[in-house]
Image (tube, grey):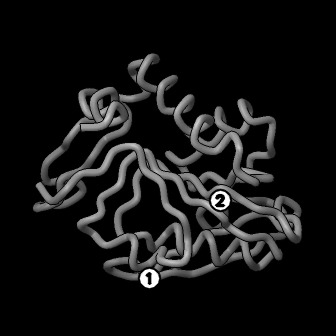
Amino acid sequence: MSKDFEVLDKVIGRVPDFPKKGILFYDITGILRHPEAFRYAIERMVEIYRDRNIDAVAGIESRGFVFAAPFAQAMGIPLILIRKKGKLPGKTYSCKYALEYGEAEIEVHTTDISKGQNILLVDDLIATGGTLKAAADLISQGGAKVTEVFGVIGLPFLNYKTALSDLNVTTLVNYQSE
């Protein structure tokens, strides 16, 4: 068992049958209620990415913002917000992607992406990888490249590595099917 798992697993909540019957929801708000666990997660992110060629960090709405913002500040790099459609006031790039029952769309300000940037993409949890793949495609519209993907929690049994096969994915805690 890794130190990451030992520190974080005890504060990560598990909510059965949410958001629908048969789903076990992993709740990161326990990390946020425990400052030492939150600090640990951010410090681990900095440790992992300190020497990598990252020009900016992009957080996925909304829980990805929680981890991307303090990381950006600690690293002294720009923070890019990837939001749901219609939430950004300026000119945007957009990308539609499939959900289990329907479709969603995310956007980013065109002014937030610079050609040639290497961007770390952050979310709280990586399940199927669909949202993160769409976010990577979104970033490429501006001529930047997602070089790394980070999630506090990974659910590899949902096959996110398939959707994100061309990206380097790092998670702190992985759960197998429960």
- Residue beneath the point at 80% across and 53% down: 55
- Location of mark 1 (residue): 98
In this view, 161 is above or below 119: below
For residue 40, which numbered disc appears in the image?
Answer: none
Q: Position of residue 128 (x, y in %)?
A: 36, 70
Q: Quadrant of the C terminus?
A: bottom left
- Location of mark 2 (residue): 82
Q: Position of residue 63 (x, y in %)?
A: 50, 45
Q: Tell which of 25 and 18 is nearer to you.
A: 25
Instruction: Tell me which corner region of the image, top left, top right, bottom left or bottom right, holds residue 136.
Output: bottom right
Q: Position of residue 105 (x, y in %)?
A: 57, 74
Q: Tell which of 39 and 80 is nearer to you.
A: 39
Q: Quadrant of the N terminus?
A: top left
Q: What's the distance in space between the residues labelled 2 and 1, CA to CA?
A: 17 Å
Secondary structure category for the residue under label 1 = strand
In this view, 178 is above or below 115: above
- How crowded pointer 2 is (Cα within 10 Å; few <14, some 14-19, many 20+) is rated as many
Is 62 positioned to the left or the right of 78 in the image?
Answer: left
- Residue beneath the point at 71% across and 30% down: 74
Instruction: Tell me which corner region of the image, top left, top right, bottom left or bottom right, holds residue 14.
Output: top left
- Residue beneath the point at 65% across and 36% down: 71
Circle nearer the N terminus (2, 1): 2
In this view, 92 is above or below 22: below
Is 13 positioned to the left or the right of 42 in the image?
Answer: left
